[in-house]
Image: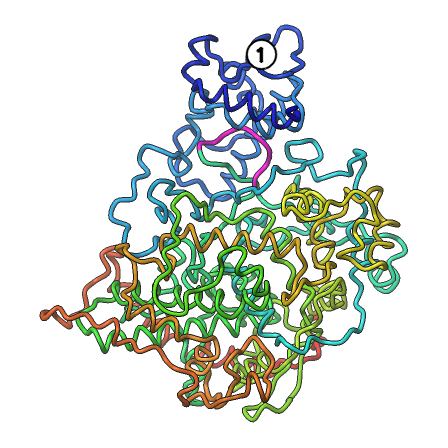
Amino acid sequence: MKTPLMWRVFVLSAVLAQGLDAWRSDHEECALPLKHFKYISPSGYGEKCITYTNVTDAFHEACRGILGIEPGTDDLTDIQLDNFGDVIQETTRILCDWFGLTKDQVRSLLPIINTANTDIGSYCPKELKSYPGNDCGNGIGFRSADGRCNNFVHPHWGASKLPFKRFIPPDYGDGIKSIRTSITGFPLPNPRSISARVHKDIARPHRTDITFMFAAFGQLIDHDLTLTAETKDPITRQEIKCCSGASHPYCIPVNVPTDDQFFVGSHRQRCIDMIRSLAGVNIDCPLGPRVQTNALTSAIDGNFIYGSNENVAKKLRSFEGGKLSMVPVLAGHRLKPILPPKKHQPDDGCIRPHPDLYCFLAGDNRVNEQLALGVLHTIFAREHNRIADELCAINSHWDDERLYQETRRIVGAMIQHITYNEFLPKLLGKHTMRKYGLELSPTGYSNNYDPDTDITIPAVFGAAAFRFGHSLLPDAMERWSVDHKFLGSRRFSEMFQQPYDLHKPGWLDQYLLGMVNQASQAMDDAVTSQVTNHLFQEPANDYGKDLASINIQRAREHGIPSYPAWRQFCKLPPIKSWSSMLTDISNATIKAYYDLYTSPEDVDLWSAGVSERSIEDSIIGPTFGCIIAKTFSDLKKGDRFWYENPGLPNSFTLEQLNEIKKVKLSRVICDNSDNIVTIQPFALEQPSQYKNNRVSCKGYLLPQMDLWAWKEYTGCCSKKKVPNPNNPNTQIHKVQVNEWNKEDDNLQKFIQAIAVNISSSKPNSWK
């Protein structure tokens, strides 16, 4: 006997087999025939079908005084996409009211209506249309900046400024866009109550196997994969202060319970700022529930270094020798360059205690979020320039563009290799790596490319599963000496969005050595108070935000289904009662859930995911393990530029591939630090005398890539620099860069002087 869901899928498949033209021939202007489904249609509207006229009427009603774009507008900004997405959601709600649709029908049936046959089609921008006009041209050898044309059949898969995909349908309170509610229809428990009860800061033994570098590198990879389009002030890009009276329709502040000991008891704060992510629009502008936009390319391609669109990429380049712009502000100390200052919208993601003090500019704006990210961004930007210099010496006939693209391709491959060779095996364990096909070939190619695999990042990955690392964060970031002795530490609350220590001579190395020596916290439900009470704390305050509350609320507003739904997706033992959680979650945590939630079916995914016991040799539990492994499996199989792929125009030669497979993160650190002498081979793991003993950076145990594998024997070439064909003002830009370095030399010295004098205590003048 067919279940209702199976029957719905069967009927839908039969209808789709007839094609849209068949529908229109049987029903004049019919967009969706209702006779096939159990709809409750109000009298006078669509007795047999929803027509294209119905959709157009609903659209015009939805956009009265709201829609701020003209028909035929292309290259929409994130604000315009949000505006258009809001109107599509409202059109969906109106049709839902007119035809009495259920949540399931909104999710599964309305999106199949071809809105190109309605007035929505005239507003759907070119970049969101499947065809025509979206051919891939000659984009074969190198990745495009925005990720388009990775897949020739589906050129949008994995591109930036497009929505996250869904592994399972979203769960919104109203089925369309409101925050997820309990199965009873009432609101879910207060996020701060869950944070304070389940995720309180408890002193537990540190992990003995992984370093803080593991959590930091994981966050770096997250910033290569996901960045949900944020609601900010459109001019300054500063956060909107919902708790300070800002009347924005997207405000969803977390109300702090009156019995909260920290926010209310100590600081009389009843509100934690939070605002909804911007709405997005799916390909071909269909109806349906709210979606969120990923501002980044989905593939592992190093976009945190290079940016996810051409405009950002050009701002980061020097247009000389294929290199990135960096600042030699510490050259007087014989130290390598650091990242350039962010002068455009300088307050975006940056706490500036002095108007002449700037955060850093990088491919991802979160470079300044916490200091460990700034350290790793600097190391990988230096690695790009180091490789570009070597390639320039080997192939002196290559112009700036060729050097930049070849280096970018190599660095992207290195990041892929480190992720799958060092990070994922430790995170997921051997069994899960093998089960999901994540293991690498020791040498040579791996012919697993599948053009039918969509590499688009799933919503659940960014909104919940890959936030597991928040449990691993320590209270402070340590500095260690070149001979691996502890020097000191600074609390994270003093460094959130304040990366100024990297202006101090020698401190980047000290933080790097701290990251490869400092132990990570245990993977469990406990989270440091540095992020549950002091996240993004401003210098004038003694409190900040609560990351655990934000994680819970963010997943709810993105329509991420509850923990039991994901257990079902992963084919794990179902959660039907509180006692059924005991196999993977501790008694104390389940007791807290019982006191907070109405039903086990309501439990939030992030909270339960970090609370699960780890399985076998992995760090995380089975539910997050399943979601993360499935995501990285898609990224490996569906990426045309995956570094192990053979036989494609963009493939590495066998000799080049085997050189890339020599790379370790420790080698990258050695090559791009200032004066580090020794390091353990596996930088994500604790040094050990027997398994991971420190070795010399100059020794044979940390082999370097031989870039002569990239030697191009053409027999002819000019050494003259060729202007970048995509940037006709290359020479002008070059002069501007040089002038900037000269004119701002005094400013750089001033920035350094201010940074050096910033202490761990907050000066009264900041207040």
Secondary-structure class at tag 1: loop
- For label 1, the residue is 35
Quadrant containing the N terminus is: top right
Q: Residue furthest top?
A: 44
Q: Is 229 positioned to the left or the right of 180 in the image?
A: left
Q: Residue at x 38, y 75 (%)?
A: 743
Q: Where is residue 145 in the image (x, y as percent from the top left)?
A: 37, 54
Q: What stretch is highlighted in magenta?
A: 284-291
Q: Residue furthest left?
A: 716
Q: Where is residue 469 in the image (x, y as percent from the top left)?
A: 64, 64
Q: Where is residue 565 in the image (x, y as percent from the top left)?
A: 69, 42
At label 1, the amino acid type is Lys
Residue in the foreground of this view, choosing between 229 and 576: 576
Q: Does the magenta stretch include residue 287?
A: yes
Up the image or down, 79 lies above or below 314; here it is above
Res 66 quadrant in image: top right
Quadrant containing the C terminus is: bottom right
Q: Is 256 positioned to the left or the right of 751 in the image?
A: right
